[in-house]
Amino acid sequence: MKDHKCLLPILLFTAGSLLLNACSFSFEVVSTPVPTPAVAMTETSQSGVDDTAELSSSDSDRLGLCFSYPQGYTQIDADAVEIAAPDLPGSNAKGLFWIEISDAYDRTIEVIADQDMTYAAGVDVGRWDLTLDGEPAVVLDGMPGQDLQRRVYVVHQGTLYVLAFMPTRSENHAANDQMEAMYSAVTSSWTWSPCSAGE
């Protein structure tokens, strides 16, 4: 009987931890006005990905951006940009990508990335620079969350865009490969609206 009484707090703690982790996986999307409608992007090959799909033109118009992602991946939220890789046999893990959009409050991406690094105390986070359609960006790889994330920070016309990819550094190599394919496709095709048909 004592064994069952000891298990109850552990089960409640575990359920609470899962609930907190699930709640931490949230984001906000703020619409930005786009003066000219976006044109659909063509399918291209992205580092081992044979075909890509494009963000819908209505989302491109609403958000002021365009990108491609691997064919067979699914946009799972109509109100926000959240894309999931196909399910993996025998695993709950899979590659995920989402975008957080907010006001940059006149901060540079370096300042924003430095501020977010304070949440990663004790974690060895990789950091490098990137360019997204002419805008400088900072990549932080290994940021804590539900799983370790790769986060790309870019500011365009006073708006902060955080591109989040997970899982990174995962022992589940298939899920990690899905994330890498998504990261490569999204960052190499990223364009601010209006998108040109040749991109």
Image (spheres, rainbow, N blue to C red):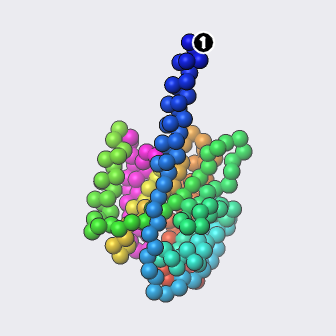
Q: Position of residue 183 (x, y in %)?
A: 53, 59
Q: Quadrant of the N terminus?
A: top right
Q: Amino acid at mark 1?
A: Met
Q: Is residue 191 left or right of residue 175?
A: left
Query: In the figure, 153 relative to 63: above or below?
Result: above
Query: In the figure, 194 relative to 177: above or below?
Result: below
Residue under the image location 65 percent in, 61 percent down: 73
Q: Is residue 178 magenta?
A: no
Secondary structure of the residue carrying numbered label 1 = loop
- The residue where tag 1 is placed is 1
Q: Is residue 141 magenta?
A: yes
Q: Position of residue 96 (x, y in %)?
A: 57, 54
- State whether residue 148 appears in this view: no
Residue under the image location 67 percent in, 42 percent down: 91
Q: Position of residue 13 (x, y in %)?
A: 50, 31
> Which residue lies most toward the right here?
89
* Crowd band around label 1 with a 10 angstrom C-alpha radius: few (<14), some (14–19), many (20+): few
Q: Quadrant of residue 3?
A: top right
- State whether residue 75 appears in this view: yes
Residue under the image location 50 percent in, 71 percent down: 190
Q: Position of residue 104 (x, y in %)?
A: 33, 66
Q: Is residue 178 left or right of residue 108?
A: right
Residue under the image location 35 percent in, 76 percent down: 157
> Which residue lies most toward the bottom here?
36
Q: Quadrant of the C terminus?
A: bottom right
State whether the magenta stretch is mostly helix, strand or loop: strand
| Extent of the magenta region | 123-147
> Camera-side residue: 77 or 104?
77
Query: In the figure, 180 relative to 124: above or below?
Result: below
